[in-house]
């Protein structure tokens, strides 16, 4: 497969090159910090940012891409579904 950009350094402005499904959990950290989070179905999303701050993002609509760097998606208060971490 041709990848015209394989010799360029990735940065936070680059498009994501990998993704993984996120199952919210109150203690387990994600396998790696995200550069964005995709929310597939409506609901609230409680996250712990890489800074350690924890917030609830209320009323996220399904199909929303959030440009946030998180270490955890917490099960408590998260009602959104089909969550994907993008890196």
Image (cartoon, grey):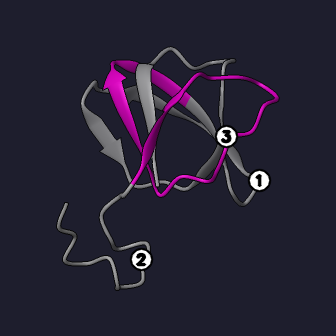
Element carrying mark 3: loop
* Residue 29 among those drawn in magenta: yes
**Where does label 2 land, which residue?**
10
**Where does label 3 land, which residue?**
30
In the displayed structure, would residue 68 be above or below residue 79? below
- Classed neighbour count for the residue bearing mark 1: other residues with Cα under 10 Å, few (<14), some (14–19), many (≥20): few
Give coordinates of residue 56: x percent, y percent: 58, 33
Give coordinates of residue 9: x percent, y percent: 42, 83
Q: Is residue 43 left or right of residue 15?
A: right
| First reached walking from the N terminus: tag 3 or tag 2 | 2
Element carrying mark 1: loop
Mark in the foreground, 1 or 2: 2
Q: Is residue 30 left or right of residue 64?
A: right
| First reached walking from the N terminus: tag 1 or tag 2 | 2
To which quarter of the image does residue 22 belong? top right
Placement of the N terminus among the 4 image quadrants = bottom left
Give coordinates of residue 60: x percent, y percent: 36, 29
* Residue 52 among those drawn in magenta: no
Residue situated in front as seen by the camera: 20 or 72: 20
| First reached walking from the N terminus: tag 3 or tag 1 | 3
**Where does label 1 land, which residue?**
52
In the displayed structure, would residue 23 be above or below residue 4? above
In the displayed structure, would residue 83 be above or below residue 9? above
The span picked out in magenta is: 18-45
To which quarter of the image does residue 82 belong? top left
């Amino acid at each position: 497969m041709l990848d015209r950009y394989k010799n360029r350094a990735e940065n936070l402005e680059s498009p994501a090159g990998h993704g993984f499904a996120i199952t919210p959990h109150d203690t387990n950290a994600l396998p790696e910090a995200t550069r964005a989070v995709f929310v597939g179905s409506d609901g609230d999303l409680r996250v712990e940012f890489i800074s350690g701050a924890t917030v609830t993002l209320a009323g996220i609509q399904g199909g929303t891409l959030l440009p946030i760097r998180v270490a955890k998606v917490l099960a408590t208060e998260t009602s959104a579904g089909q969550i994907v971490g993008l890196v």
